Amino acid sequence: MCGRFSLTASGEELAEAFGLDDVPDIVPRYNIAPSQPLLVVRREGGRPRAAALRWGLSRAAVPVRGFPGDGADGPDLLINARSETAATGQAFRDSFRNRRCLIPADGFYEWKRGRSGPDPFHVRRRDQRVFAFAGLWAPPPPGAGAEQGACVILTTEANVLVAPIHDRMPVILPPEAYGAWLETARGHELALERLLRPFPEAELEARAVSAAVNSVANDGPQCQAPAPPRPAQGLLFPE
């Protein structure tokens, strides 16, 4: 699953990484949460373009009910889609065929169950470069005015690094697959499904971080501060 992530790269870094003609005007985000606007890259006029979408599809807009989720979805929003069924299931099949997008990030958060509650971890590339989640988007409903639509993040089974924290992780696409993921020509969906696998654990690192990220009200560097050391428990000291 993916319930929070970060994007602190500059507009220039994003333009270079995703082949954008224009430099997007963005501010660093340390704690992007569901229902908030986020930056995506999708193909428009044959070129990759940056756009703003809301993170999370309204359940009312999804054509079926009861399909598998990842446990991070709220009562009104679907924020993740299982990659194993997205291409064939009724809920996301149309978006998988026609409305794929890249969701830039430089890390994501997962929570591991600890003795005193969930402990947050920030997972990022070892080289700390920006990367992209595989995303699907949907247009706004009729009468939504200037709203540009909404998106979900595809998830897959966790790799060896993430598995001790959570059994699911977002699909991270390799840079060489960005063009194929955005290509709208029909007939290559099967090839795209081969991209929906866990990212190599050797290229990632997971760091225990401050509980500040637990609150959506916090969106600054404190969210990625190292977790404070925990006192040892159950140790016996001689008198």
Image (cartoon, rainbow, N blue to C red):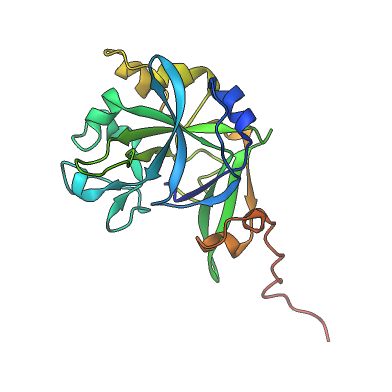
Q: Position of residue 174 (x, y in %)?
A: 52, 24
User: Which residue lies most toward the right here?
Assistant: 239
Q: In the image shown, does 61 or 124 lie closer to the viewer?
A: 61
Who is closer to the viewer here, 235 or 152?
Answer: 152
Q: Which quadrant: the C terminus? A: bottom right
Q: Quadrant of residue 98?
A: top left
To which quarter of the image does residue 115 belong? bottom right
Q: Is residue 162 above or below residue 131?
A: below
Across the whole image, how many numbered discs are drawn on residues? Answer: 0
Q: Residue furthest front?
A: 145
Residue 28 appears in view: yes
Residue 168 visible? The answer is: no
Image location of residue 23, percent across then percent down? 57, 28
Residue closest to the eye, 13 or 170: 13
Q: Name the spot of residue 202 as percent of width and height, x first.
A: 62, 32
Q: Is residue 93 left or right of residue 163?
A: left
Q: Quadrant of residue 47?
A: top left
Who's the residue at 54% across and 24% down the image?
Answer: 22
Tell which of 191 and 53 is nearer to you.
53
Report x, y in % for residue 164. Answer: 53, 50
Position of 128 compared to 68: left or right? Answer: right
* Residue with the most extreme left position: 64
Q: Kindly identify the residue that appears in the image at 23 percent across and 29 percent down.
A: 94
Q: Residue at x 82, y 82 (%)?
A: 238
Residue at figure coordinates x 67%, y 36% from the top left: 128
Looking at the image, residue 82 sits to the left or right of residue 116; the answer is left
